Image (tube, grey):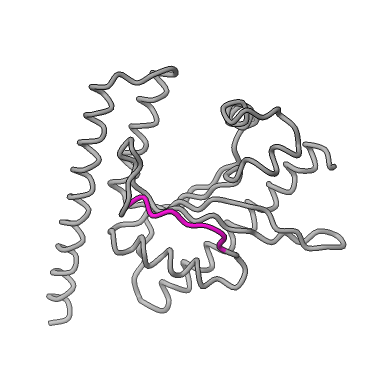
Amino acid sequence: MESKEELFLKYKFARSMLETEIKILIEEFVFMHGYNPVEHVKSRIKSEASIMKKLQKKGYEYTTLNIDQHIHDIVGIRIVVSFLSDVYDIASVIKKSKSLIVIDQEDYIKDPKESGYISYHLNVLVPIYLENRIEYMEAEVQIRTIAMDFWASLDHKIQYKFPNQIPQEIKDQLYENSLIIKELDNQMMHLNEAVNKYDKH
């Protein structure tokens, strides 16, 4: 089995490939539709501390084999879009990619997590071109609106303040606020559709 250094080098390559492919797909979408739905894109490679913590939570030792087999979001890219409909447009574009292979998807917009988390996730295989072979590395693509991103960012900060257990009243308020975010996204999408009708006239 390869060393951790070799494995993380391949994750670094996968991140670069994923960034490039997403950039190309977005630029083609803008060219075809005359509209850029993307507010910003951010990618990352999970830190070793985060990986250790996640493996420990799942009951596995910190080994190269366990990293490769049990952690599916070491490479991640977040695409933040303007409107709710844009989430599904960008997801559709990624699914049609000839380079990326979608192996799983979770629509946490239609079916939010218990915490109230809402987003659209795609797990993809990213090709990396090595000296004498092509390998596929797993990565997670998150697509969400500005409002969803706002909620998720603050939720992350609040959870960090309660490493053991979040008080129930805080959980309840977070969930209620996620419902407000979801309703706001729906209203803003309908408003955008109304504006587009005026543009056509």
For the C terminus, the image quarter is bottom left
Which x, y percent locates residue 35?
34, 70
Q: How many marks?
A: 0
Q: Is residue 42 left or right of residue 69?
A: left
- Taking the spot 44% from the left edge, 19% from the top edge, the residue there is 163
Region in magenta: 102-109
Snapshot quadrant of residue 47: top right
Q: Is residue 74 left or right of residue 142?
A: right
Q: Main secondary structure of the magenta part?
A: strand
Residue lying farthest to the right in this orientation: 132
Q: Is residue 2 above or below residue 101?
A: above
114 and 12: which is toward the camera: 114
- Taking the spot 60% from the left edge, 73% from the top edge, the residue there is 98
Which x, y percent locates residue 137?
68, 53
- Taking the spot 30% from the left edge, 54% from the top edge, the residue there is 110
Which x, y percent locates residue 157?
38, 27
- Taking the spot 43% from the left edge, 76% from the top edge, the residue there is 31
For the N terminus, the image quarter is top right
Q: Is residue 96 above or below residue 153?
A: below
Which x, y percent locates residue 64?
76, 37
168 and 162: which is toward the camera: 168
Asked whether residue 115 is drawn in magenta, I would say: no
Q: Is residue 91 left or right of residue 172?
A: right
Snapshot quadrant of residue 166: top left
Q: Is residue 18 above or below residue 171?
A: below
